[in-house]
Image (cartoon, grey):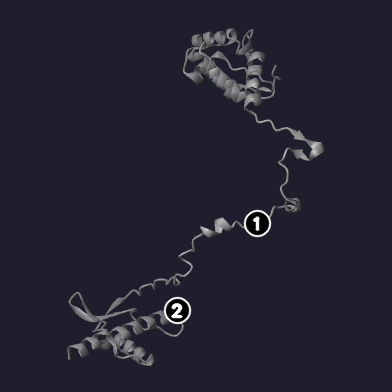
Amino acid sequence: MSECRPFREVKLQWLQQLSCDADLSDSAKCVALYIVTTHLNGHTEKAWPSYQTIADATGKSVKTIQRAVRELQVQGWFEVQRGNGVGHNTEYRPSAPSIIRASGAREKTDKVVTLYPAEGGQIRPIRRSEMSREGRQICPPNLEKEKINKPNPREGAPPRVLPRRAVPLVFVAETQLQQISQWRNWLIDQGMPALEKLELRTMKCGKYGYALPGHWPPDITNPNALEWITFFLQRLEQFGTGGTRQTEVRRAS
């Protein structure tokens, strides 16, 4: 015979067996589920909700609740001690036979591992080597497994080249003489040709001007100075001396 465990330990098994009881009506199952999951004290294993409280929570009438409680008592799921007036509600408690049945179901689902403290605890297979006694087993290399290992194709791949962020350009009209003049002087200081040779001249809204990295050339402390110099060097390689356009001219000649 199974040992009767505390109800809080076999609550799940108790509810599973209750839901599978074909002799119980749906109203009785609903009332039992509400009492056990909402009002039952885990230590005293008792609950004291009134008929009206259960009716309001389950959406059923008081008469239906009374019939369901009587059915749960007759079928042996609850021990019911009826109250004797206002302030003395009916007391509900899962019956001892139902708790014993749930305890038996709990024992079947638990995994029991036999322990032998005198031999070191849980039963283990015999050690295959003395190396495992040192704390971890050292396995010899598996030559067959090494034969089927394929080299990683990424090992010989060239290093990944990160894409360069494009420099945002602004339009500086030719009528803005002071800005254009400062840009020309800045390019000369950097050892670069004039704006016209860098193919930066463009038109916007019917006005001619230049697409430049900024409205004004950068000073030494500007963190974008190096990035803008790189931009002009790339333009110089593309359109300046030795660039693509002059190569095309030589081919045409």
Pick whichever, 166 or 89, lies toward us. Answer: 166
Give neighbour class at mark 1: few <14, some 14-19, many 20+ (Cα, 10 Å): few
Task: Residue at 49% x, 19% y: name it.
Answer: 58
Choose top left, top right, bottom left or bottom right for residue 202: bottom left
Q: Quadrant of the C terminus?
A: bottom left
Pick whichever, 128 or 85, lies toward us. Answer: 128
Q: Secondary structure at mark 2?
A: loop
| Numbered mark located on residue 223 in the image | 2
Report whether 109 appears left or right of 233.
right
Q: Amino acid at mark 2?
A: Pro
| Numbered mark located on residue 81 in the image | none
Report whether 118 appears left or right of 25.
right
| Residue 12 position in % (x across, y down) | 59, 25
Indicate whether 81 appears above or below 192: above
Task: Residue at 49% x, 61% y: name it.
Answer: 150
Task: Residue at 62% x, 27% y: name it.
Answer: 109
Give neighbour class at mark 2: few <14, some 14-19, many 20+ (Cα, 10 Å): few
Q: Secondary structure at mark 1?
A: loop
| Residue 83 position in % (x across, y down) | 63, 9
| Residue 176 position in % (x across, y down) | 27, 84
Q: Amino acid at mark 1?
A: Pro
| Numbered mark located on residue 140 in the image | 1
Choose top left, top right, bottom left or bottom right for residue 200: bottom left
Q: Quadrant of the N terminus?
A: top right
Whether residue 89 is visible: no
The residue sitting at the right extreme is 118
Pick whichever, 200 or 220, lies toward us. Answer: 200
Pick whichever, 218 or 121, lies toward us. Answer: 121
Whether residue 108 is visible: yes
Whichever of labels 1 and 2 marks the residue nearer the N terminus, that label is 1
